Image: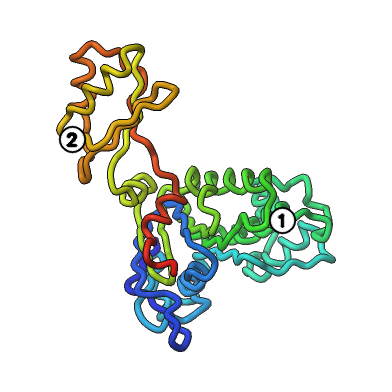
């Protein structure tokens, strides 16, 4: 659905986007993560055909941004961080106005507006003035506007920016809905935790460089120097810790106050089935045995070490 090859944008001596390669498929919800000024918006604008690259290629649904920009615009819904609204219109009037801009006419137009309002849970505000909406409600109406022409690809630039916690939760719910509709969604954010439980894949960008790209769990694994396990047993915690310490793949063992045994495996060791087997064979009653997950913030900091000066 979206493919970029060495996509690059320069502003004088500044390389805003440096040879980015992406390959996103139908139904992917892709979290584009990075601080302000890292190149997220520039990349999305190039994919949306709103900004010409200096080098590289980009394709949307097999169409080139160079030769097929009009077709791409029909297939893409782009929602910028800040977008204009017309305060003197009702919500329904606002959507119908943009239907005209998308050349959606005829008796079915109003039904389309109703369906999109229902999708974003804003039907109850259909007759409200746009000027009376909260920031979160305005964002949802903006998303409804982006969906009017039923695009296959959505580019959402910081859709949760400036929202209160409740509104952020509502936006995350909407993103899940869009993934279930098999749309390809690119959603950017500089607030990392809000994307972890929404996206199927993430890309991390810093100073125009894509430092990581893949499924969420794989990117988190990539950020770790070693795997850490959390283990708890019913009794004989110290004995279990000593057994684990003697295992060939274990680098460090710490027993915490609550009885959790935190095990750091040697570098490049990813498989630990034999460790679990050793505990069971020694008659330990194990009720917790899991891999400690790295959150997206930690992963980003690890993967961008040396780039943040």
Q: Residue lying at the far bottom in this picture: please name it.
A: 12
Distance from Cα at disc 2 to Cα at disc 1: 64 Å
- Is residue 152 among the parts visible in the rendering? no
Q: Tell me, for residue 294, which label it has, or none.
A: none
The residue lying at 20 percent from left, 21 percent from top is 277
Query: Residue 137: x, y in percent?
Result: 72, 52
Above or below, 42 relative to 253 = below
Q: What residue sits right under mark 1 in the picture?
A: 110
Residue at left offset 40%, top offset 21% = 259
Residue at 23% from the left image edge and 26% from the top image edge: 244
From the viewer's perspective, is 130 left or right of 247?
A: right
244 vs 35: above or below: above
Q: Secondary structure at mark 1?
A: helix
Q: Is 111 rendered above or below residue 276?
A: below
Direction from residue 290 to residue 9 in the image, left or right: right
* Numbered disc total: 2
Quarter of the figure with residue 290? top left
Answer with left or right where residue 9 lies relative to residue 56: right
Quadrant for the N terminus in the image: bottom left
Residue on which disc 2 sits: 249
* 16, 86: nearer the viewer: 16
Please give left or right for residue 194 compared with residue 7 in the image.
right
Task: For mark 2, give the secondary structure.
Answer: loop
Where's the C terminus, which quadrant?
A: bottom left
| Residue 124: percent from left, percent from top | 77, 45
Q: Is residue 140 visible?
A: yes
């Amino acid at each position: 659905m979206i493919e970029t090859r060495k996509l690059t944008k320069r502003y004088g001596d500044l390389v805003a986007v440096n040879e980015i390669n992406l390959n996103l498929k139908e139904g992917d919800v892709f979290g584009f993560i990075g601080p302000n000024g890292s190149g997220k918006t520039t990349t999305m604008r190039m994919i949306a055909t709103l900004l010409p690259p200096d080098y590289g290629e980009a394709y949307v649904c097999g169409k080139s941004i160079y030769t097929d920009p009009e077709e791409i615009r029909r297939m893409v819904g782009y929602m910028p961080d800040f977008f204009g609204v017309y305060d003197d219109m009702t919500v329904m009037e606002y959507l119908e106005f943009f239907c005209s801009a998308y050349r959606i006419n005829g008796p079915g137009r109003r039904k389309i507006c109703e369906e999109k309002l229902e999708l974003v849970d804003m039907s109850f505000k259909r007759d409200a003035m746009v000027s009376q909406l909260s920031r979160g409600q305005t964002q949802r109406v903006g998303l409804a506007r982006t969906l009017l022409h039923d695009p296959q690809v959505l580019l959402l630039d910081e859709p949760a920016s400036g929202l209160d916690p409740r509104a952020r939760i509502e936006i995350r719910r909407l993103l899940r809905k869009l993934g279930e509709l098999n749309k390809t969604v690119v959603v950017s954010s500089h607030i990392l935790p809000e994307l972890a439980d929404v996206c199927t894949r993430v890309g991390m960008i810093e100073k125009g460089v894509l430092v990581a790209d893949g499924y969420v769990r794989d990117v988190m694994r990539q950020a770790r120097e070693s795997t850490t396990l959390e283990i708890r047993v019913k009794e004989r915690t110290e004995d279990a810790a000593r057994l684990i310490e003697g295992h060939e793949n274990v680098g460090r063992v710490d027993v915490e106050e609550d009885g959790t045994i935190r095990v750091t495996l040697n570098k490049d060791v990813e498989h630990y089935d034999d460790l679990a087997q050793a505990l069971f064979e020694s008659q330990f009653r194990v009720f917790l045995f899991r891999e400690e997950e790295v959150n997206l913030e930690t992963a980003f900091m690890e993967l961008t070490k040396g780039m943040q000066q």
